[in-house]
Image (tube, helix red, strand yellow):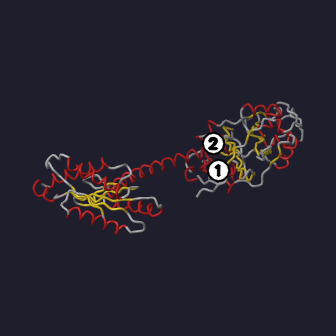
Amino acid sequence: MMPTIEEIAVKSILSIEITKPLKEAIKRMASSNLRNIVVIENTPVNHKNFYLLTISDLINYKLDNIDEEILLKDLKLTKAKILKKDLNILNVLNEVETTDKYMVIVENDELIGILSYTDIINNIDPKILMKKQTIATLILQYKATTTYENTSTIQAIKMMKDNNSDSIIIINDDHKAIGIFTTKDFINLIHKNSNLHKPINLFMSNPVYTLNESATISEAIDFIRDKHFKRIVVTNDDEEIIGILTQKELLRIIYNKWIDFIKEEADKISKMNEELLSKTSILEEKASFDFLTKLYNRRKFNTFLEYEISKANRYKEEFLSLLLIDIDYFKNVNDFHGHLVGDNILQEVSKILTICSRDTDIVARWGGEEFILMLPQTNVEQAFLVAQKLRVTIEKHKFDEVKHITCSIGVTQFQRNEDKDTLFKRVDSALYKAKNAGRNRVEIE
């Protein structure tokens, strides 16, 4: 079961009102040792907007000489992506893959959490998929930004910006890593108003912890978790830097593989579902329709009738009538012309009943040479007229093998709160009266 984002989100959120100066935001970020702060705007209509002030923004402001006294509302801040608290990790995969910003969780216009890449990576277990692939197969597209130790800090920061990197590796003349400078270090520099023209080696962090390119992705995940790092510096066997992997990039790799696996399994399940649906459809058809006439069978008709009876009992003005139809002397047709001719006549009568009925009427084969029609919203007088029309149509129809066929029809109307069996007995009694009165006629009970 995937955890919801509310369960893994950070509830202690660093925030600031949009009316505060940039200087105050930097102070709060430095004292909290965080790279992002949520900026809250209260609108005149009692609605809140949420923005993100990121370390990338601070770098740009510093390079553009933006005054730290400027109010946050006067800056072009990025509006935060808002998520619902009950989403799970799979629901936010697209967000993880397409943005480098934190995502906020809001309920009833109140900020209740913030979700980062760290939160996500600490709540997944992709090791089964990651045990064999090494980071050497991935690192080629993730080159590290490097510079020498005597490079000025301002120049190093510009290199980070130009390379869209959140860190820069400081190397010596032998191309060995001796330190690292990250966006976290940058916040402290501008907070302390340090001289950015001094060499970067004065402000870098060391030592640099590295991981060999032969490590698996699973081992890389453990490395990040154990060290609480935001990135992995990857080296070859000669301890030369060959690339750098951030949490974001590693997370993308993990989930791409995970999604591929899920898609494969989903395709298998989808094919199985299609086969099951096809078989279910065939079984449903067999269970609901008469094979010979393609009309509904008695079982399916009863299902429709039960629904219409419940509706007629609920509403006072709801009428419901039944017609029970029997082909006269049908046994003689089978005896003198054969069952194949008899089947053809049953099919022809079925077509006549279907054509002469409304879309709301239900036509079914009741059994043998008997058919039944349910007429919703029809009283017994109206049903009698329908029955007479059907009787005349069948009488005048020219059948191929037997020139003349007639039918007898019983008609009845549902009485409120009576059961289905009572209704059937009454329509059957009406049909019996029609047959005893000479056939080829309609009787009401």
Using the rendered view, name the quadrant where residue 305 is placed: bottom left
Left or right of 386 in this view: 195: right
Residue at which label 2 appears: 97
Residue 346 picture location, percent across and down: 22, 53
Using the rendered view, name the quadrant where residue 289 is placed: bottom left
- Which quadrant is the N terminus positioned in? bottom right
Type of amino acid under label 2: Glu
Foreground of the two, 197 or 102: 102
Residue at which label 1 appears: 221
Tell me how far mark 1 sits from mark 2, CA to CA: 17 Å
Q: Residue at x 47, y 61 (%)?
A: 316
Residue 171 picture location, percent across and down: 76, 36
SS of the residue under disc 1 = helix
Does any portion of residue 179 appear in the rendered image?
A: no
Does any portion of residue 268 appear in the rendered image?
A: yes
SS of the residue under disc 2 = helix
Work out whether mark 1 precedes mark 2 in sequence or the reverse, and give the earlier one: 2
Left or right of 254 in this view: 390: left
Type of amino acid under label 1: Ile
Q: Residue at x 41, y 62 (%)?
A: 309
- Which quadrant is the C terminus positioned in? bottom left
Rendered position, 58 above or below 83: above
